Amino acid sequence: MADTIGGPEAQFRAFLKQGRFMLQRSRSTGKHVYYPRVAVPGSGETDLDWVEAAGTGTVYATTVNRTRDGNTNLAIIELDEGPRMMSRVEGVAAETVKIGQRVRARIAVEDAAEIILFEVLA
Amino acid sequence: MTHPIRGKTAVVGIATFGCGEAPGWSSIELMCQSAMLALADAGIPLHEVDGVFAATATHAFPTMSVAEYLGVKPRYFDGTNVGGSSFEQHMLNAALALDAGLCNVALICYGSNQRTASGKLVPLSEPQPYETPYKPRMPMNAYALAASRHMHEYGTTREQMAEVAVAARGWANLNPEAFMHGKPLSVADVMGSRLISDPFTALDCCLVTDGGAACVMVRADRAKDCAQQPAYLLGAAGANWHRTISMMPDLTVTACAESGPRAFGMAGMTQADVDLVMLYDAFTINTILFLEDLGFCPKGEGGRFVAEGRIAPGGDLAVNTNGGGLSCVHPGMYGMYLIVESVRQLRGQAGARQVAECNVALLNGNGGTLSSQITALLGTAAAL
């Protein structure tokens, strides 16, 4: 448990502020959960602990927002622990991001809040 | 065994109003003008309306707003909002309420002036804490992500997606009400249009228009005596698997893989019985996904299925004969227009685009980001 009051979302964000990308994991099933919830979706286990995410994953789906201000990536990443999350793959041209690419998470600050972004693993 | 609500209710009045551009008209005006026209179509006086169903992107309490504006006092009302699929859910809920005797005349309506008022899709949605920080452009990005996955898993091509837009335009060119009527479109036009969210170009995306639409439902015993030929509700079912695209279990399989079989089961029908298919085509990938999930072709074959004009006028399967959200009308929530076009075709009132011997229409409402799917089957008396 993070040293914070509040629900799973507030705890997740408190960890992020400390530079830690945490997932929930059910003690009885070993199943990981993202985004943070009060129970495992579908099966309902509430025995959730916070565990450090490996931070590695694979691009599951990707698109490029093409605007006057330039191209930005938007992707769904499948984490090695199983859950998927929306994010952006940065550090390469947005249109070169491919499904199946291996990526690694980093924590950045955007709009005064911590956010998890990904970069391509060499 | 026949399902207890199969054929027990019917759509007896339909109308559209202000489709395309309706400068100076407010959303409630478009909605209620459509409602009045649908009642006139049915030959039912306003004061008999005792069930009101509505959802919009601009009204917190749409059924209250409609009841007040029209001066009716509904005893059953339902403002369920599952995005563009709301009206298919309303149709199912209205059938249940009518069959249970909780109301006698059900009015379902929608209206939006978002083209002339804002020029872009008006979202009702609250920020999504695990998506909004990445600044997605919704709903477009969600459908583009699904398209990227479909291309990856099944080899679906840009050309095949463009075929969906071209087929829709072909139908729109037979429909004088369609916003893009009179503007021919080729696969090369779609592919050469501006890329906005890979793999989508601007022409893979639905229109943003104004428009109102409404329908009126009654029990089957009364339907026989209405001014127009009834369109009986033969089956309807919903399925909802997620809210945000990043939580969709499999980006290539939508929840109509469940709602479709349930609706067919209620109707006691199969794909072979369907004369017209009306699919919520907010983006070109939608038509491909829904044709697969509703069983008109195997999973992964949707792109190849739509190729070579198969769903265009003169093709093997009549799909989205009004021109769809891609080329006819899309005032933010399009689901009401699936009902209107289905009924027009079942009545034989579709003019140059009329499907021959149209007795059964399947419509599939889609809401959110492929989130809510509601499938319904409407049919003529011959299909009962």
Image (cartoon, coloured by chain):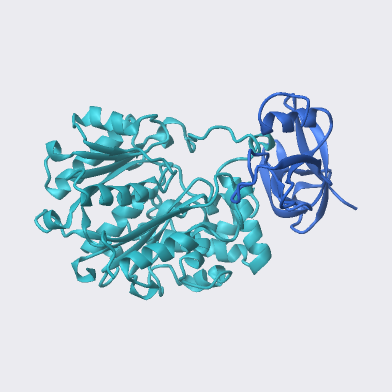
Chain colours: A blue, B cyan
**Residue B283 to residue B117: above or below:** below
Counting the numbered discs, the total is 0
Q: Is residue B194 visible?
A: no
Assign the N terminus of chain B to one quadrant of the image.
bottom left
| Residue B81 rendering spot, x and y as whole percentages | 41, 40
Nearest the eye: A111 or A46: A46
Residue B199 as seen in the image, left or right of residue A106 = left
Q: Residue furthest right?
A: A122
Task: Identify the residue at horizontal 81%, vertical 33% (top origin).
Answer: A108
| Residue B198 rendering spot, x and y as whole percentages | 65, 52
Residue A43 as seen in the image, left or right of residue B45 = right
Q: Is residue A35 visible?
A: yes
Q: Quadrant of residue B127?
A: top right
Task: Identify the residue at horizontal 34%, vertical 70% (top origin).
Answer: B274
| Residue B54 rendering spot, x and y as whole percentages | 32, 39
Q: Quadrant of residue B345?
A: bottom left
| Residue B336 rendering spot, x and y as whole percentages | 34, 48
**Residue B162 to residue B139: above or below:** below
Q: Quadrant of residue A7?
A: top right
Assign the C terminus of chain B to one quadrant of the image.
bottom left
Residue B356 as seen in the image, left or right of residue B151 = left
Q: Residue furthest left?
A: B225
**Residue B21 to residue B95: above or below:** above
Task: Identify the residue at horizontal 62%, vertical 48% (top origin).
Answer: B247
